Amino acid sequence: MPIKELLTCRDVMQLTGIRSRSTIWRRIQRGAFPAPLDFGAGRLRWRSEDISDWVNSMPRRRY
């Protein structure tokens, strides 16, 4: 399995527009946001495709 891009929490916040780490963790606990990979020693990373899939699954606003 080839390694795709791994994102830091800051990267995830910039890509999603979520402004708070706490919001990300609350959503993870509710099962409403992709969980990160744990590489140990406090190094957490998200797969870019997981975040992309989450963004693409959001409903479009209709006017």
Image: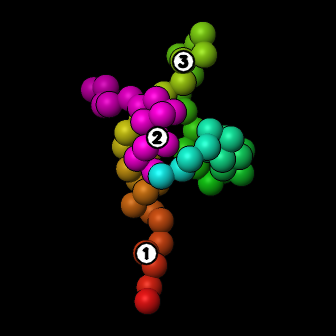
- Few, some or many residues within 10 Å of mark 3 (<14, 14–19, 20+): few
Q: CA distance from mark 1 to mark 3?
A: 33 Å
Residue 19 placed where, x, y %?
Answer: 56, 47
Q: Quadrant for the N terminus, please.
A: top left
Marks 2 and 3, the one that precedes in the sequence = 2
Q: Which residue position holds label 2?
A: 12
Tell me the kind of residue under disc 1. Answer: Arg
Query: Is residue 15 on the magenta stretch?
Result: yes
Residue 2 placed where, x, y %?
Answer: 27, 26
- Few, some or many residues within 10 Å of mark 2 (<14, 14–19, 20+): many
Query: Is residue 4 on the magenta stretch?
Result: yes
Residue 40 placed where, x, y %?
Answer: 58, 13
Q: Which residue position holds label 3?
A: 43
Q: CA distance from mark 2 to mark 3?
A: 14 Å
What residue sits 51% from the left and 33% below the top? 9
Tell me the kind of residue under disc 2. Answer: Val
Residue 42 placed where, x, y %?
Answer: 60, 16
Q: What number is the disc on residue 18?
A: none
Q: Which residue position holds label 1?
A: 60
Q: Which residues are magenta?
A: 1-16
Q: Quadrant for the C terminus, please.
A: bottom left
Tell me whether circle 1 and circle 3 mark residues in contact (CB < 8 Å). Answer: no
Q: Residue furthest front?
A: 19
Image-based side of 9 in relation to 21, left or right: left
- Few, some or many residues within 10 Å of mark 1 (<14, 14–19, 20+): few
Marks 1 and 3, the one that precedes in the sequence = 3
Q: Is residue 3 visible?
A: yes
